[in-house]
Image: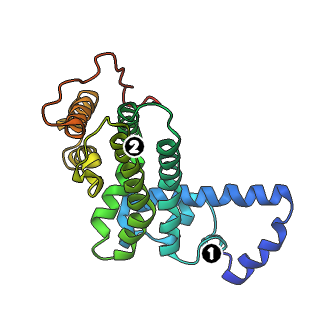
Amino acid sequence: METHTSARMNVAKVSTPHGRARKLQRREKILAAAFEEFAAKGYTEARLDDVAERAGIAKGTIYLYFKNKGVLFQAVLRSLIRHVCEDFERFVRTFSGSAEELVCSALSRQYTELVKNPKARAMFRLLIAESHKFPQLSDIYLREVVTPGLAAMRVLVERGVASGEFRQTRITEFPQILAAPAVLAVVWTLLLGERHGFDFDAYREAHLDFVLRGLRGINSTNTPKDTEFPRVGETP
């Protein structure tokens, strides 16, 4: 079993490109093992000894990369969601189509990356179960997922208002409304599982219709008939 001191001394041996690649691979291996451990046992019951066993390494090796369990959990959360959030922000801000097309594509991404993503659902369940005991976990989620996601959705709505496609409403103050049905779909799946599931493709189309009617105006009936909705699991 490696001690913390001897493990840290080994850092000097990874200065070559090959050594750095091995270090990166080991870090990813630890993150994968930690996700499995957190998902199976929750934050409180997860043990670094078991993470090390899952990763096939000595426990001391973990401390080369992560100071403690809390830091490791933060890294797991970031590894699962940061790229999704960054990609979503970039996607919204650089989208070249109409605001309605952007809404359609953005909601498709929600269902692909959240509703139908088992790892995202597992992390969501973990945060719900543990955040009241460890509020710093929900703080991380708010800062790195919710806040940038809401900012991107606010940009989406403001673009539609500026182009005249959407009416001015208070949705810009509460862009959570745009994602709420997708979050409900995740909670439904977590509580009731596959045995009481429903057609997520049809549900997503109902979600889109609900959102567009609200954005356009209460009497609007001009849903584009030629819009093709990507099926859940496809890249929009």
Residue drawn 26% across the image and 56% down it? 174
Instruction: Name the element at disc 2.
Output: helix
Q: Nearer the viewer, residue 105 or 218?
A: 218
In percent of width and height, residue 94 lies at 53, 41
* Crowdedness near tag 2: few (<14), some (14–19) or many (≥20) residues, C-alpha within 10 Å: some
Q: Quadrant of residue 117?
A: top left
Question: Helix, strand, or loop for circle 1?
Answer: loop
Give the labeled residue for mark 1.
63
Does 226 appear above or below 137?
A: above
Q: Residue furthest left?
A: 219
For label 2, the residue is 159
Q: Residue at x 63, y 64 (%)?
A: 57
Report whether residue 115 is seen. Answer: no
The disc placed on residue 205 is: none
Q: Which residue: 24% across, 27% down?
A: 202
Foreground of the two, 24 or 83: 83
- Callout 1 amino acid: Tyr
As measured in the structure, the alpha-carbon distance from the residue carrying label 1 to the one carrying label 2 is 46 Å
